[in-house]
Image: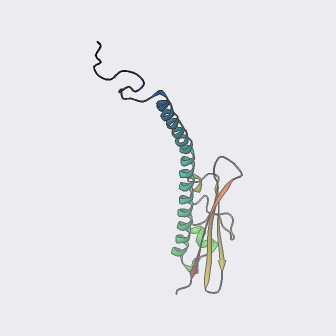
Amino acid sequence: MCRLYGPVKGLHSSRKGFTLVEVLLSLGVFVVLTLIFSASVPLAHRTAKLNGQYSQAISLCQHKIDQLRAIGYGRINYTELSDAQVIDESPSYSPFSFTEVDSVEEYLPDPVTRLSVQYGSGEITATATISWRSGTSTDKRSTVSLSAVITNVE
């Protein structure tokens, strides 16, 4: 007579653990997620750099408008703007440039600046524009423009 003690080892083992298929499947999911994440890092870096350039350009344009307001309505002309170092010496007519005076090259690659001043009846419309090379391509440029109306409040 033969007695059996405990469960018979066979197809339904009581051992705990993962099968090879489960391990390979989880490893595959991990690899796919890692690839997606690693591909997004360079894109996030380029986006952050471009956002920083836009912020810098907007800040420079706002600074230029604030300088015009500080000079005042009656003194917005080439001589006063040049003496106050608000604009570059060249050109001497609107639209002016402010690339050198504000050292815009330190902040943005290959910048082109323009300060357009239009005189109206009792008001001046000033538009500061900055264009720069964005990305590694030489033909792709980004532009920021900011306009303000300066009135005679005397």
**Quadrant location, the N terminus:** top left
Taking the spot 63% from the left edge, 49% from the top edge, the residue there is: 135
Horizontally, residue 23 falls left or right of residue 104, namely left
The residue positioned farthest toward the front in the image shown:
1
101 lies above or below 33: below
Q: Nearer the viewer, residue 65 or 8?
A: 8
Which residue sits at x=63%, y=52%? Answer: 134
- Identify which residue is drawn at 60% across, 58% down: 100
Colouring:
rainbow
Picture residue at 53% right of the left edge, 44% below the top? 41
Return the x and y of residue 63 as percentages of the image width and height. 53, 66
Q: Determine whether, in the image, residue 69 is placed left or right of residue 96.
A: left
How many numbered discs, if any? 0
Using the image as rendered, state which of residue 87 and residue 9 is in the foreground. 9
Q: Is residue 6 above or below residue 127?
A: above
- Residue at the top extreme, as displayed: 1
In the picture as drawn, the residue positioned furthest to the right comes out as 139
Residue 52 in the image: x percent, y percent? Answer: 53, 55
Nearer to us in this view, 26 or 76: 26
Question: Which image quadrant is residue 89 in?
Answer: bottom right
Could you say where residue 68 lies in the image, as x and y percent from the top left? 55, 73
Vertical placement of 66 versus 142: above or below? Answer: below
